[in-house]
């Protein structure tokens, strides 16, 4: 455990493996030997196509230019997620990035809006958020000095290829081959080496497990243990299919609740990503496939494939000299597009706690504790969408509405429903605006607002609300159409080929 770390071995490629390889080669490659082992014969899940704004942090660390990443990955911009049929059938709302209105020292903007609603002074709460209104109007632009409150829809496979090229340019080594065995030190149980089917032995000091659901190192070798969350998040299957684009891409993801799960629709520049997340206890693979194919736009360009999963997390994400990143670390369904974020956070956290002079248990414990806090926050936020609903039209939705939930989530629901209060704790991912939008979107309207709002005279409150709304509208009115800006700013390589063919 006290051996200096000179060689980092990444087991597996895909999004997780190549994000890790890119970061370590760029930021620590001068001091480390970095090797990634993957097999061309092993496919990746590769359906994650939506991100959240935190990816900007990762790209800035690596010095990546936004236009280059987007053009290489067929990407469009994302300002939020529209949830259709979640509150109830035919009731929709948008969870946008950015911030709602203006807060004061004692309370958030929602309290001013709630009183304004009682006084018939307000329109929907999204009208007081630039990103929310821009998403609904299909507008977007990257402007000087603007906040990074946008994310991307991208092709995850192309993203991995882009990062592979970047990592190789910074000196990392890729070894082709299937892992046949994981060798351990007899005395400590630490991982010593990966043995490939070819017989080659790849030794290392620190191992990063990016082997996907197999969790070949962290679980099959180290028996770390898994915390099952499927009683709170019962969906256990997904079907994915890509279709031809039939309309200009919109700047938000669509999440459409179905009888026993939900459907995603993610617009890229030249195609659309589609999928259905569902619970196999209430729907068969065949029925789910038929449901998805009957609710897509455009011709399919690949065969639908079924992916099985279990929601939950490893009991430790760092165990001995092995760190699990990506699907090997656990899985939270892609409802709020958090998978790539968790990969990124684990990479950055490992870099911050990097055991240059040997693994220290205190650092391992800190890594695991920080990861647990963040995972629990994301878990609760996703459960919220299922629990707080008026839907009772199927066995699946009746189960979700009536299921017991974590005490941490129940506390947030109770506090907001009574007093309208929301808090973000420490380094939690989802902030107050996100919790407010989803809770209210799912039909949870607080009984009270903060009394400090009553210090405002009605005319002052009306002016306050109107000024915010007018400012948001003026900003959005200056923005071009999302599709036009994408074509100007980051036209994908695939789109350029199409345009060149058209001209010739």
Image: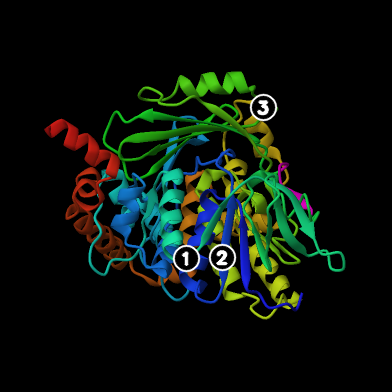
State which tag comes first along the sequence, 3 or 2: 2
Circle 3: is it few (<14), some (14-19), or many (20+) Cα within 10 Å?
Answer: few
Residue farthest along the front direction in this orientation: 199
What residue is shown at x 53% (from left), y 44% (from top)?
335
In the image: residue 495, left or right of residue 342:
left
Instruction: Residue under label 2, please give it.
Output: 34
State which tag comes first along the sequence, 1 or 3: 1
Q: Helix, strand or loop at disc 3?
A: helix
Instruction: Residue under label 1, please give it.
Output: 171
Q: Name the image quarter holding the C terminus.
A: top left
Instruction: Residue under label 3, please give it.
Output: 395
Residue 221 lies, in percent from the top left, at 78, 53
Please report contact status of discs 2 and 1: CB closer than 8 Å, yes or no: yes
Q: Helix, strand or loop at disc 2?
A: strand
Circle 1: is it few (<14), some (14-19), or many (20+) Cα within 10 Å?
Answer: some
What colour scheme has been applied to the protein in the rendered image?
Answer: rainbow
Q: Which mark is residue 265?
A: none
Please tell me whether residue 425 is drawn above or below residue 195 in the rendered image.
Answer: below
Q: In the rendered image, is residue 122 in sight? A: no
- Magenta segment includes 50: no
- Which quadrant of the figure has residue 499? top left
What's drawn in magenta, residue-wise?
Answer: 225-231
Q: Disc count in the image?
A: 3
In the image: residue 431, left or right of residue 169:
right
């Amino acid at each position: 455990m006290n051996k200096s770390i000179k060689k980092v071995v990444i087991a597996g490629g895909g999004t997780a493996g190549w994000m890790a390889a890119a970061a370590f080669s760029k930021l620590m490659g001068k001091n480390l030997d970095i090797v990634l082992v993957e097999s061309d014969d092993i496919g990746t899940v590769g359906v994650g196509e939506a991100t959240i704004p935190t990816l900007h942090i990762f790209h800035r660390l690596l010095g990546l230019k936004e236009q280059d990443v987007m053009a290489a990955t067929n990407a469009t911009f994302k300002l939020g997620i529209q949830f259709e049929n979640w509150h109830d059938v035919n009731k929709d709302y948008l969870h946008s990035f950015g911030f709602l209105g203006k807060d004061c020292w004692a309370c958030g903007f929602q309290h001013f809006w709630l009183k304004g609603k009682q006084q018939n002074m307000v329109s929907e709460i999204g009208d007081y958020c630039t990103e929310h209104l821009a998403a609904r109007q299909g507008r977007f632009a990257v402007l000087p000095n603007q906040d990074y409150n946008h994310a991307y829809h991208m092709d995850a496979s192309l993203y991995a290829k882009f990062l592979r090229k970047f990592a190789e340019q910074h000196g990392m080594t890729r070894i082709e081959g299937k892992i046949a065995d994981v060798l351990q030190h007899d005395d400590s149980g630490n991982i010593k080496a990966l043995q490939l089917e070819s017989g080659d032995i790849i030794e290392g000091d620190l191992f990063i497990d990016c082997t996907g659901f197999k969790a070949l190192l962290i679980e099959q070798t180290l028996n770390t243990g898994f915390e099952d969350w499927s009683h709170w998040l019962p969906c256990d299957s997904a079907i994915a299919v890509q279709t031809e684009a039939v309309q200009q891409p919109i700047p938000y993801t669509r999440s459409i609740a179905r009888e026993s799960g939900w459907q995603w629709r993610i617009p890229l520049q030249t195609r659309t990503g589609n999928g259905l997340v569902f619970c196999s206890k209430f729907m068969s693979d065949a029925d789910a496939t038929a449901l998805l194919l009957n609710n897509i736009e455009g011709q399919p360009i690949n065969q639908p494939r079924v992916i099985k999963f279990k929601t939950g997390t490893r009991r430790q994400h760092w165990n001995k000299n092995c760190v699990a990143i990506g699907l090997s670390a656990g899985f939270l369904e892609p409802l709020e597009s958090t998978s790539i974020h968790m990969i990124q956070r684990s990479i950055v956290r490992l870099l911050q706690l990097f055991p240059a002079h040997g693994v220290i248990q205190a650092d391992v414990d800190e890594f695991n504790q920080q990861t647990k806090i963040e995972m629990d926050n994301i878990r609760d936020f996703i459960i919220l969408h299922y629990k707080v609903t008026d839907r009772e039209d199927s066995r699946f939705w009746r189960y979700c509405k009536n299921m017991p939930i974590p005490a941490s989530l129940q506390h947030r629901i109770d506090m907001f429903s009574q007093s309208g209060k929301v808090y973000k704790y420490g380094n939690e991912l989802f902030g107050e605006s996100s919790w407010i939008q989803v809770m209210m979107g799912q039909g949870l309207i607080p009984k009270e607002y903060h009394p400090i709002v009553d210090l405002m005279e009605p005319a002052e409150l009306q002016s306050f609300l109107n000024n915010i709304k007018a400012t948001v509208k003026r900003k959005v009115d200056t923005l071009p159409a999302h599709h036009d800006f994408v074509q100007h700013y980051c036209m994908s390589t695939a789109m350029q080929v199409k345009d060149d063919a058209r001209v010739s």
